[in-house]
Amino acid sequence: MASKIRESILHALSSGEDNYFSGQELADKAGCSRTAIWKHIEDLRSSGFLIESKRKKGYRLLGKADELNESNLLVGLKTSVLGRKIHYYESVESTQKIAHALAQEEAPEGTLVIAEEQVSGRGRMARNWYSPKGTGIWMSLILRPALPPQKAPQFTLIMAVAVVEAIQKVCDLQVDIKWPNDLLIKGKKITGILTELQADSEQIHSLIIGTGINVNQSESDFAEDIRDIATSLKIESDRTFSRATIVQEILKNLERYYDIYIKEGFEPIKEIWEQYAVTIGKHITARTINKEISGYAAGITNEGVLKLVDETGKTHLIYSADIE
Ligand code: BTN
């Protein structure tokens, strides 16, 4: 009930431009008392919503705490490089596409492209990535590590660890990693990561790490055909989260792990990744674009490639696949 009242208040206050709503009007809409409205308004304010109250007029929403714009993201951001340059959009085809163009125009390392909505969000293996307005995190980060292109898959795994730990800290939810790029809560997908690169045969020019996180969607926000396989942080906890806080936590974690990676290599991060991974140590089927191999997932290589041992004992190196 509490979250329904909160939603009803936010819905009303967001519905008209510059409109005031009296406590009684909000109470009628939410089906509760004026005292309950007052209490929820206080709660919303402490979550960061700017709500004005004026005598004889009522309440008015001045600012949505949860917009992912540059100022909301920069206030309280604890990084030196990542996310220090932000390109924010209301609606884009794909943040990945914009980040590729910016990377070619020499955008600095750590540049973040983030949008409220993507109308042609892209997933792995040419799939679509559903990115509805204002409810999730749709972002692409540009990194410029001086490394050969074979190292690129490691960055999907580094980002996975950064996101898992951010969700644990901000939302108190346990997240599992399914190799290579899926983050799951109770078996349902919460996050996908798409790492792409601009490189020559010797060196990476730029890495574009695209991350999609389902945050504040309700079950009815997902199309019926994906309700069984996808979930959101809100569905799993019955709470709404500040997307900006999650982004800030991810960037902070990633900067720390990126630093460790540059100084000590992939090994320390691989160890942490393995603690969260559900794929390893199981019998699985890997579907690549042109074949299907079943076997035992023995671990990942230092490059982040999956080692799959088939029934004859032969080890296959899987670079990209769907896992079942
Ligand atoms: C997957 O699991 O298939 C990867 C999904 C990656 C989605 C993100 S959302 C932000 C960025 N922009 C895109 O178009 N895709 C990535």
Image: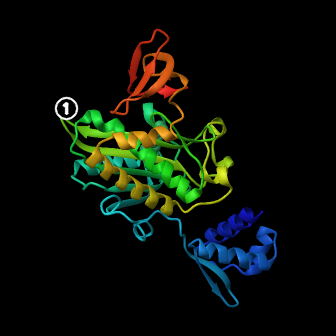
- Where does residue 102 sit, x and y in percent of width and height? 28, 51
Quadrant of ligand 1: it is top left
Horizontal placement of 307 versus 149: left or right? right
- The image position of residue 278, as x and y in percent, is 54, 34
Q: Secondary structure at mark 1?
A: loop
Which residue is the extreme one toward the top? 312
Q: Name the amino acid, label 1.
A: Ser
Judge whether residue 121 can be spotted in this image.
no
Q: Residue at x 46, y 25 (%)?
A: 298
Residue 100 in the image, given as x and y percentages of width and height: 30, 46
Looking at the rendering, which quadrant does residue 204 occupy? top left
- The reply, left or right, for residue 281 in relation to residue 85 is right
Q: In the rendered view of the protein, which quadrant contains the N terminus?
A: bottom right
The answer to whether residue 300 is above or below residue 87 is above
Q: Which image quadrant for residue 35?
A: bottom right
User: Given the current orientation, which residue lies at the most extreme bottom position?
Assistant: 55
